[in-house]
Image (spheres, helix red, strand yellow):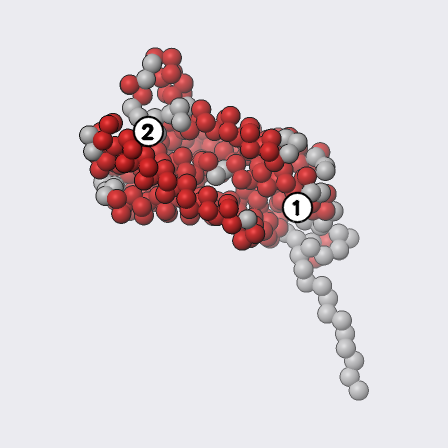
Amino acid sequence: MTTTTPAAPTTVLASPSDESTAATATTAVRLFAWRSLLKLRHTPEQAADAILIPVLFTVLFTFLFGGALAGSPQEYLQFLLPGTLVMAILLMTVYGGLSLNTDVSRGVVDRFRSLPVWQAAHVVGTLAGDVGRYVVAAALVVLLGLLLGWRPDGGAYGVVAGVGLALVFAYALSWVWASIGLLARSPESVAMLSFLIQFPLTFASNAFVDPDTMPDWLQVWVDANPVSLLVTAERGLFAGTADLGDIAWVLASSVALVAVLAPLTLRLYRRRSA
């Protein structure tokens, strides 16, 4: 005669009273990051954004403005590609805020807060998962640029360093949208606010044209715009002429964003309910 013993639950989201099976912070962050990536399967339009936006920006801007601004699309592509890479990635950083706002609106956040996991893991994991989307966009821009004739003098190391620097800044910027996502009343509000902020941040920069051609008052904003600092650092890394001062400014800006916004966002997360 044999007896069957029920198997003990092995999920990391077990009973809150059982601390021995509570999820570690790392495991919880990894699970929420994976959840963020799985959302692409159920919302294919977001995956389409990750693919189409970089392609459209690179191809259209190169052939629309190349002849007028640089004499030929090939010449303009050398100047443009760091800008389109930065713009394609930064426009996607808003998805983290949209995802958090949707979770709040549907009451999912209240369920997560009842689980025996590190409470901040939902926010940290969601933003970390979005980095995978940024990597796809960056890879597409680089591959498309190489196909169109872009040749980075900095070689593979320069390209990898440039992409890595853009990912660091994008992750830091995503905390801005996480805060807005927890403050806004609806996903539509997050989308509207993102447009009002992203438009001057990305277009009023040195991504597409030389600031010397702009009015003095606009140059003041463009020179101080952190996106301009990032694009300048990208151009230096891709060309093999990187200035450590430019890279340091981008890294310092990223650290400052996370240092200020991460505690604020997590405080909002603890207080926000559906």
Picture quarter with the C terminus: top right
Q: Secondary structure at mark 1?
A: loop
Residue depicted at x 71% and y 50%? 116
Which of the two labelled residues, at mark 2 and mark 1, occupies the earlier sequence position?
1
Is residue 141 among the parts visible in the rendering?
yes
Q: Is residue 269 left or right of residue 168?
A: right
In which image quadrant can residue 85 be found?
Answer: top left
Q: Report how many numbered discs are placed on residues in the image.
A: 2
Residue 246 in view of the camera: no
| Image: 186 above or below 129 | above
Label 2 – label 1 distance at C-alpha: 42 Å
Q: Which mark is residue 208?
A: 2
On screen, 106 above or below 35? above
Residue 190 appears left or right of 71: right
- Residue farthest along the bottom direction in this orientation: 1
Q: Residue at x 29, y 24 (%)?
A: 210
Q: Residues within 10 Å of mark 2 (few under 14, many from 20)?
A: many
Q: Residue at x 33, y 14 (%)?
A: 215
Secondary structure beneath label 2: loop
Question: Mark 2 is on which residue type?
Answer: Phe
Q: Which residue is mark 1?
A: 118
